[in-house]
Amino acid sequence: MHFWTRSLNIFFVVAVGASGQTDPGVREFEARCAFCHGGDGAGGERGPSSLPGRRGRQRSEADWRDLIRKGIPGGGMPGYELDDGAMRALLGFIQSIVSPAG
């Protein structure tokens, strides 16, 4: 029993430590978007993909900012009022998955 408790504690410390190293944009996305849109933005059971492709949608940074702030009333997507730093971080992460380098 002691072995399993100790192993669980080590796992918890490693998991918490790893999440503390996460990029702020990733943390914002995970906290607000990933549940519906998937951790990689490719879509999930509750929300569509954030990536261009099937819908061919390209959004400007201003479009993303408006969508995040206003949400989609009646469409199940809430809006979020984020401070400037959190919004910049989230937009940076979204840009990285929508237009990956390479």
Image (cartoon, rainbow, N blue to C red):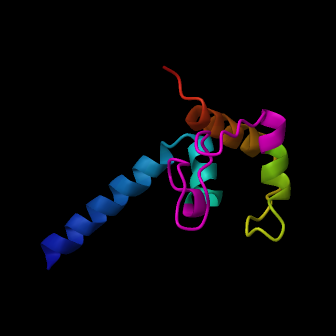
Q: Residue at x 70, y 40 (%)?
A: 57
How many numbered badges does the structure rendering display? 0
Q: In which quarter of the image is residue 56?
A: top right
Place of residue 21 in the rendered image (x, y in percent of width and height, measured from the top left)? 48, 42
Taking 82 as reference, is 63 above or below it?
above
Q: Is residue 2 left or right of residue 50?
A: left
Find out whether residue 51 is within the magenta segment. Answer: yes
Image quadrant where one finds the N terminus: bottom left
Q: Is residue 98 left or right of residue 61?
A: left
The region drawn magenta spans: 35-64
Viewer-side residue, 25 vs 18: 25
Q: Residue at x 56, y 57 (%)?
A: 34
Q: Which residue is the extreme one toward the bottom?
A: 1
Residue 61 appears in view:
yes
What's the magenta bit mostly, secondary-structure-wise? loop
Place of residue 100 in the rendered image (x, y in percent of width and height, measured from the top left)? 54, 28
Viewer-side residue, 90 vs 96: 96
Find out whether residue 37 is within the magenta segment. Answer: yes
Place of residue 41 in the rendered image (x, y in percent of width and height, measured from the top left)? 56, 48
Taking 6 as reference, is 61 above or below it?
above
Viewer-side residue, 33 vs 21: 33
Residue 82 appears in view:
no
Q: Which residue is drawn at 61% across and 57% down?
A: 48
Taking 9 as reference, is 58 above or below it?
above
Viewer-side residue, 70 vs 13: 70
Q: Is residue 42 left or right of residue 74?
A: left
Q: Residue at x 83, y 53 (%)?
A: 69
Place of residue 6 in the rendered image (x, y in percent of width and height, measured from the top left)? 21, 68
